[in-house]
Amino acid sequence: MKTKMIKVSEATNTQLDWLVAKCRGILQEWANDAGTGRVLRAPSYCRPTTDRAQAMELVESEGVCLRRGHSGWWFAYQLTVNDEEVFLVLSATLLVAVARCYVASKLGENVEVPDDLT
């Protein structure tokens, strides 16, 4: 599987859903479209960028904090266990802000995703 490095702050919804599934250990192996190998895909039920209940579950289980700025953008942030690092992200939507914050706190600001995820 070919991969590319991206910034979490620039990840698409599809990429973020895949990254959340990776962090939660629920990626599923599938045959690729060409039938020449296996690829890892997020299960169809893992859609925190569009499913409010899933995003709120991340807020509750992972301690993601939310705040809406005067500009209308959402701030999502999370402290690590030792309170030494703060992961802060901005997004126009609450759900994407939560997903970006969760992924950045687990994997860092730069991540690898499959080439074919858009």
Image: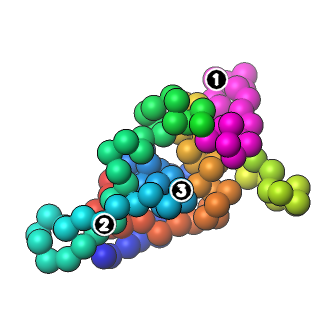
User: Which mark sits nearer the N-terminus, 3 or 2?
Assistant: 3
Q: Amino acid at mark 3?
A: Arg
In this rendering, the count of numbered labels is 3
Going 19% across and 68% down the picture, which residue do you hit? 31
Q: What label does residue 29 carry, if any?
A: 2
Q: Amino acid at mark 1?
A: Gly
Magenta region, residue range: 58-75
Is residue 49 left or right of 82 when viewed as pictured?
left
- Whether residue 69 is in magenta: the answer is yes
**Relative image position of residue 79 (x, y in whole percent):** 80, 51
Q: Are marks 1 and 2 in contact (CB under 8 Å)?
A: no
**Direction right: furthest residue:** 83
Task: Please identify the quadrant where the N terminus is shown.
Answer: bottom left
According to the picture, the residue beneath numbered tag 3 turns out to be 24
In the image, is 93 to the left or to the right of 65?
A: left
Asked if residue 89 shows in the view, the reply is no
Nearer the observer, 68 or 95 = 95
Q: Residue at x 52, y 36 (%)?
A: 54
Colour option used: rainbow
- Looking at the image, tell me whether mark 1 or mark 3 is earlier in sequence order: 3
